[in-house]
Structure formats: C-alpha cells, structure tokens
Amino acid sequence: MAFVRGNGPSFAQDQPFLDGQFDVFEWHPYFQSCVRYFLDHAQYNGPVQALAAFINIQLPFQKANQPVLSARPSGGGGGSPASAAAAAAAPNNKAGAGVIYPNATLVPYLRRLVATGFDLPAVLHGFFGDDWAAGVGPLHEQERRNYLFAAKSDSWLRVKAAYDMGEDETVPFLRPLQNVSEKEIVGAEVGWSEWLAMQDWMLGPRAPPPCGSGGGGAGGMGMGTGMGMGRGGWGG
C-alpha cells in the first residue's frame, strides 16, 4: 500500500485486499462519495429499499436506535433533518466546532450483497453511485474473497451464522459466489495459501517462496450484470 501525504515520502507495502499498489489517500474521497450517495439518495430509492427488504437488512434511516438520515453534519447531539441541514449550510463553520458527522459503515451491505449473490455492477451502482468502483470496489473484492474463505473454512450453518446480523437481520439465504473469474480464483488460492502459512508460523525468514502471480484485481473479476438487473432501475 502506498501512503503518500503532501510532499512526504511514499511508504509502499502489499495492500491487504488488492494484488498491487494502493493509495489510501487517493481512495478515500471516492469512498466518501459512496457514503454520501448511499445516505442521501440510495437509501430513499424504491429499488434499493425493495432489495434491502428482500435480503433482510435495514437501511440506515430504518435503524430503531440512532437512525442516519443523511450524510450532512448536524450540530450538538443530533437533532432533526432541518437542524442538520442548517448546520451543514452554516457559514464559517469550523471543522470540529460542535459539528457531528454521521457515522455509517458500508461493509455490512457489501457482505449481505455478496452472500446473497446480488453484488452485481448495476446493483452496486444503485447503492453507492457513480464512484462505486473506485470507492467500494476494493472492499467489495475483499468481501468476495472473505466469502470464499468462509465457505472453505466451515460448514454452511456456521457460515450462515457468521453472515447473520442479529435476530432481526438474519441472512435469508446464501448463494454461491456469482460471476467468478479464473483470475479471482487464482488470487484467492494465493491468499489462502498465505493464510495457511500464517497458521504454521511460516512468516518472515520462514515464509515459503511465491507460488504464483495470481491476481484478484477488480479488472479481472469479469462481473456481468446478470439476473436481469439493468441499470435503469438502480440509477436513483
């Protein structure tokens, strides 16, 4: 992972979920764009609400405790959408001066879409907007690999339990990973071999030599729209 800030040095190391180099500071604005789209637009979109209901996951505004209505900041300890909008639009509002930015994670939605076979490009675009590939693409790829690892690690019952989210948001079904490419499988095999080496403490000077050049890069994932999910119903 290449960390570059300002004119400072670049610290390059293996990125944990993509085979290659990754600049976290370049990625983060795209991820923030996905969060804003999801909170401000997607969660109020009919097709997104329908799919969320079908795969049994609550959208942020549906949460009984601390619902998140918007990506806009709010003043003080929360408040109404009107007060949040006013705080966001207030002039000369210095960062950190009584402003609270909503905290919403996208990973549970990626996990649920992957486990139920709905992690299709059109669906991801509908949930996370035009910047989904750059913003949540790396996380999506890692969740696909995690799902492969989970299936290899344990029984169906335990995998399902791992993908449940409490009594009210259990995963209704699991589907085998969809639209898998040979490159993705090879990349997962390499990652799994590295994990087995970790279990045997084959690290550092004891690490085995590289056993392949597999890649799990987003460009090699070969994901089609499939299942009749055209972009038209998901664009928001």
Image (cartoon, rainbow, N blue to C red):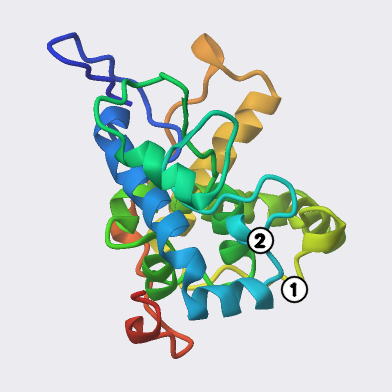
Residue 199 in the image, given as x and y percentages of width and height:
70, 27
The answer to whether residue 176 is above or below residue 20 is below
Residue 143 visible (yes or no):
yes
- Residue that appears at 74% across and 54% down: 64
Q: Quadrant of the C terminus?
A: bottom left
Residue 183 got which mark?
none
Residue 57 in the image, given as x and y percentages of width and height:
68, 64
- Using the numbered discs, state the Cα–Cα distance from disc 2 to disc 1 in whole angstroms: 22 Å
Disc 1 target residue = 173
Front-most of 6 and 89?
89
Does residue 226 appear left or right of residue 28 in this picture? right
Q: Quadrant of the N terminus?
A: top left
Front-most of 180 and 8?
8
Does residue 37 appear left or right of residue 165 in this picture? left
Front-most of 109 and 81?
81
Q: Would you call the spot at circle 1 few (<14 residues within 10 Å), some (14-19), or many (20 or more)? A: few
Residue 185 in the image, given as x and y percentages of width and height:
48, 57
Q: Earlier in the sequence, mark 2 or mark 1?
A: 2
Does residue 14 appear left or right of residue 152 in this picture? left
The residue tagged with tag 2: helix, strand or loop? Answer: helix
- Residue that appears at 57% across and 65% down: 113
Name the outermost residue toward the left. 7
Does residue 213 appear left or right of residue 108 in this picture? left
Nearer the observer: mark 2 or 1; the answer is 2
Residue type at mark 1 is Phe
The residue tagged with tag 1: helix, strand or loop? Answer: loop
The answer to whether residue 48 is above or below residue 135 is below
Residue 213 visible (yes or no):
no
Residue type at mark 2 is Gln
Disc 2 target residue = 62
Residue 65 in the image, given as x and y percentages of width and height:
74, 47
